[in-house]
Amino acid sequence: SQKIEQNSEALNIQEGKTATLTCNYTNYSPAYLQWYRQDPGRGPVFLLLIRENEKEKRKERLKVTFDTTLKQSLFHITASQPADSATYLCALLSGTYKYIFGTGTRLKVLA
Amino acid sequence: KAGVTQTPRYLIKTRGQQVTLSCSPISGHRSVSWYQQTPGQGLQFLFEYFSETQRNKGNFPGRFSGRQFSNSRSEMNVSTLELGDSALYLCASSGGLAGAERADTQYFGPGTRLTVL
């Protein structure tokens, strides 16, 4: 069956370090993958999209990689700040018009 | 541009009752998707509507239904509520054109927190 897993439920890192979050999927061949940020009590907010033919994408302090052979995406936040503390979700388009989300990784950046 | 709005924000119901939640998408967006979010299961896809037609649905019982109006506003209904239906219900709007990055990006509302007692 189709499945998306995010490496850990929670991740604590020190301010200034690089946070790396992992999204693994099985039984999909997605055309692209998205990353979202969700703060407590709020809906997810879109951050980045990476297509299957793109190895890497960057936006300010964010970097996403996509390895279709390993069926894995890595999401990096460089020079992390306490304001980056949130839950990060990866999402794939399964078939048409149906998004499947990972369960999320709760990131806490310690000052 | 106004974001996605959902009403009500909070709702308390008892088992057996039914509930209707409303979602107004971003102006110009024609696709509305609904999700259920719980601590144990994460974000689970309920269904997606585009131009008043349901294009896809998730694995939820028939007690969960939805519709979309000609102005793209959408409602979802849950009948015969069960305790397990307690969750945050999120709707997301997008342009609805598969394969187009900007059109496919989903914009979420703040959600409706439903508590079933």
Image (cartoon, helix red, strand yellow):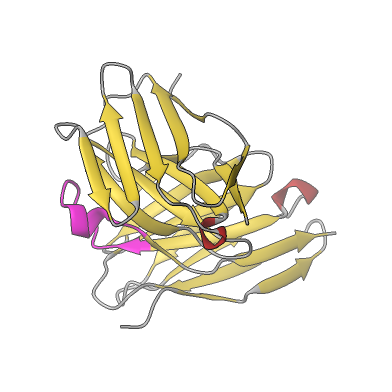
Q: In this view, does B10 lie above or below B90?
A: below
Which region shows up in magenta?
A: B93-106
Q: Residue B107 in the image: x percent, y percent?
A: 37, 63
Residue A67 as seen in the image, left or right of residue A79: left
Q: Residue A56 in the image: x percent, y percent?
A: 22, 37
Residue extending farthest to the right is B117
Q: Is residue A64 above or below residue B28?
A: above
> What residue lies at 21% left-to-right and 59% top-to-bottom?
B103
Q: Is residue A27 above or below residue A62?
A: above
Q: Is residue B98 magenta?
A: yes
Viewer-nearest residue: B9 or A26: A26
Q: Is residue A51 visible?
A: no
Q: Residue A66 in the image: x percent, y percent?
A: 28, 31
| Image label count | 0
> What residue lies at 29% left-to-right and 34% top-to-bottom?
A65
Q: Does the magenta stretch include residue B104?
A: yes
> What residue lies at 79% left-to-right and 50% top-to-bottom?
B83
Q: Is residue A30 visible?
A: yes
Residue A86 as seen in the image, left or right of residue B14: left
Image quadrant where residue A40 sits: bottom right
Viewer-nearest residue: A14 or A103: A14
> What residue lies at 57% left-to-right and 61% top-to-bottom?
B77
In the picture, which quadrant includes the C terminus of chain A? Answer: bottom right
